[in-house]
Amino acid sequence: MRRPLAIMEGKPILIVVSSIKDERELKRQRRKQSNRESARRSRLRKQAEYGELAQHVDVLKEENTTLRAELDNVKKEYDELLTQNASLKERMQGKARGLSSVINNIQIDLDSDPQSVKSDCKQGDH
């Protein structure tokens, strides 16, 4: 057995040194345990964040699918409206040509015999 070299505050120095080493070891063990717990909480937090992000990705994918379908429907409707508009323009141009032809015929009739046009109009009133 070792003999103490000196006495400090009524305790042998070997016991004081041993006590300091035990205290340091205890602090080291507590710090390790605290670090383990912190790492565990960090892993759990990251796992939860990953889960939330994965759910958000699923929601965004569904929304993207819905929006793409809506866009396709709008494009189809747009194409149908373009076709309908072109058809209506053609009909309008045909009617305008027909009206222009009628106006030209009336103008020709007026230029050639204004009296007959007046009598035709009066007969149409009856």
Image (cartoon, helix red, strand yellow):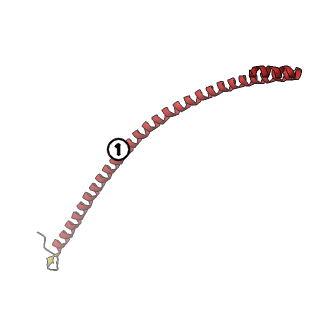
Place of residue 90 in the rendered image (x, y in percent of width and height, measured from the top left): 69, 24
On the rendered image, what quadrant is the N terminus found in? bottom left
Place of residue 74 in the rendered image (x, y in percent of width and height, measured from the top left): 54, 32
Place of residue 80 in the rendered image (x, y in percent of width and height, measured from the top left): 58, 27
Does 103 appear above or below 62? above
Residue marked by disc 1? 51
Place of residue 96 in the rendered image (x, y in percent of width and height, measured from the top left): 74, 25
Q: Is residue 111 left or right of residue 90?
A: right
Amino acid at the residue labelled 1: Gly
Compare residues 5 and 22 and report the one nearer the observer: 22
Q: Is residue 20 left or right of residue 65?
A: left
Total marks drawn? 1
Does 67 appear above or below 121? below
Does 71 appear above or below 45? above
Compare residues 72 and 122 and report the one nearer the observer: 122
Q: Would residue 95 be seen by someone viewing this image from the given angle?
A: yes
Quadrant of residue 26 within the rendered picture: bottom left
Q: Residues within 10 Å of mark 1 (few under 14, many from 20)?
A: few
Element under disc 1: helix
